[in-house]
Image: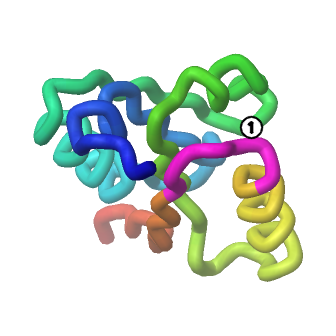
Amino acid sequence: RSAAPTEAFARVVVVHDPTTPHTAARAFADALAGSAGGQVEERDSLVSCGADALAAATCVVLAVNRQADPDETGGLVADVLTRCAHPVLIVPVSPERSPS
């Protein structure tokens, strides 16, 4: 049975590494939650995103640095997919450039 959109996006959790820009991931999360009157919560690492936070989430938005080591990224994605029983949106992001 599929959840109704209002249920699926009631509590969206954005997970990102502290050094990874996550503006795009947050925008996706805001749009998803906004479409259902839901809430968005941010976690700056999987360490701060305990099992209870993932279990309580109805959807997880994962910001992944596209320039990171593929082994690191694969491990992070595998960890989220293993720990989360809800939909996961993976958003590849590029490091922000500093003004020249």
Q: Is residue 66 left or right of residue 71?
A: left
Q: How is the image coloured?
A: rainbow
Residue visible at 28% across and 53% down in the picture: 28
- Crowding around mark 1 (Cα neighbors within 10 Å: few <14, some 14 to 19, many 20+) is some
Residue 42 coordinates in the image, percent (x, y) = 48, 29
x 23%, y 43%: residue: 5
Task: From the viewer's side, name the closer residue of 94 and 84.
Answer: 84
Is the residue 45 above or below the residue 25 in the image? above
| Residue type, mark 1 in image | Leu
Residue that label 1 marks: 46
Which region shows up in magenta? 82-88
Residue 66's place in the image compared with 80, above or below, is below
User: Residue 59 lies in magenta, yes or no?
Assistant: no
Q: Please, what secondary structure does the residue beneath circle 1 have?
A: loop
In x, y percent, where is residue 53? 63, 22
Quarter holding residue 20: bottom right
Q: Is residue 91 above or below residue 54?
A: below
62 with respect to 70 (left or right): left
- Quick one: 83 or 22, which is closer to the camera? 83
Q: Residue at x 51, y 65 (%)?
A: 90
